[in-house]
Amino acid sequence: MNVLVADDEKNIRKTLTLFFESKQHKVTAVSCARDALSEAARQSFDLAFIDLRLGTDDGLELVSALLASSPWIKIVIITAFASVDTAVEAMKRGAADYLAKPFKPGQLALVLERLALMRSLEQRLNTLQDDLHRHDPDISLTSVHPSMQRVLDLARQVALSDAVVLLRGASGTGKTVLARLIHQWSRRSEKPFGVISCPSLNPELLESELFGHIRGSFTGALRDNPGRVASCEGGTLFLDEIGDLPLSIQPKLLRFLQDREYERVGDQRTRKADVRIITATNAELEQSVASGLFRQDLYYRLNVFQITIPSLAERPGDIGTLAASMLTFFNIQNHKLIQGFTPEALEILGNHAWPGNLRELRNVVERAVILCTTEMIGAELMPETMRTSFHQPFRTSERMSLEALAELHLRRVLASSSSLHEAAEVLGIDKATLWRKRRQYGL
């Protein structure tokens, strides 16, 4: 954790610093209230140990000021002038504990352990509350296909580091899910995980969401906003669709990646944060760099460790398992006890090209669960377009254009192939051409 020590006695500051650092915590020690507030404005603290008498400063006043700017911080008042009245007043001001000098290492360890547990539980609760507000099932990325297994192996390896990760893949392939897994497998797993969708906000609001703002910095800024960087202190921030990050914000993100420093909108004060960045895109960033829409230096900084997630069409053997996992989620959400899918329904699912990947599969399963009134989801509950495509015979005698015939044939080959590599071989084209054809036909 990040610990602030404020005491006007040099020996106390040194002793506490050595003690906390021996417990693997990061410590900032200051001698007065002004420096304590200055440090609290620059970085996020989990705990603070405040002397009741800081020279001419009142430690109790500092408690109120720290909690006003950092409501989550746990504060311990330490004093050689202990009394019931000051202890009661400290608790009224919001202090979490009260420790009389001289204290022994064992006493300090007990207080530290209790408050560390309290802080950790609060962070877990915040994460659980975020999860409860999610409307999507927890998708398992376990796979029988070597390409996806390789992705998971790479994710586990990079999770052990603090390297910036760039996740690539078509829309709906599970980039957000993989980002969460990297966070869960990392040493930061007990800290917050935040998500920002770059295309969802205009540049001004996106910068505010990312770095925060102070009250009055723009129209509608009625109160201070710490921003996602500050709220994810010690954890991970996932920036989805990074290719849509406005040019005006790109140098600020680059600076944060390099120096861990930033400023809130409307505030000149420089702040620091320890946050890991994971990004994702389904766009060709190289083309954006060439066209001047994306900074080359930022691209190189983001592309430290790249992982490309295969499309669902490339791993059809996983469709049944994924559909069953989603069925469990939507059963609970809709208070149903559906047992599974009929063989014909599974065959339709397995032969669909899935241009929308996991997101499309999610929608198909949710729709089927809502409509199902029996124990099994049958073929009749699959979308009509999927059923028509599956049952429609391939008749070349029909009067159709060569382009329409090519598209129909491409759909059939994709539906019957176990991977894009196999489909490309059947069609006699390379994978790059197949990729362009799929985009052309919206597959």
Image (tube, helix red, strand yellow):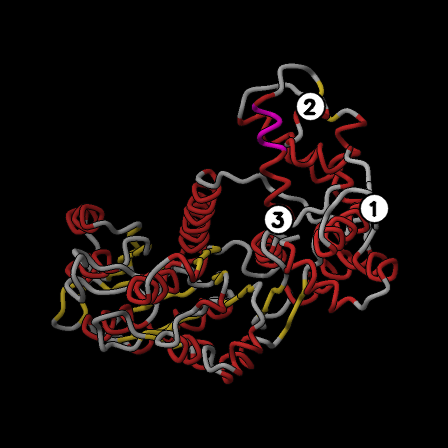
Residue ID for mark 3: 356
Locate residue 134, reporting x and y percent: 48, 41
Magenta stretch secondary structure, dominant: helix
SS state under label 3: loop
Residue ID for mark 2: 380
- Residue 103 visible in this rendered orientation of the protein: no
**Left or right relative to 209: residue 157:** right
Residue ID for mark 1: 416
> Mark 3 belongs to which amino acid?
Gly
Q: CA distance from mark 3 to mark 1?
A: 17 Å
Answer yes or no: do the residues labelled 2 and 1 have beta carbons within 8 Å? no
> Mark 1 belongs to which amino acid?
Ser
Q: Which residues are magenta?
A: 365-370
Q: Is residue 228 above or below residue 325?
A: below
* Residue for point 78% across, 41% down: 351
* Residue for point 58% across, 63% down: 282
Q: Is residue 432 magenta?
A: no
- Residue 62 visible in this rendered orientation of the protein: yes
Answer yes or no: do the residues labelled 3 and 1 have beta carbons within 8 Å? no
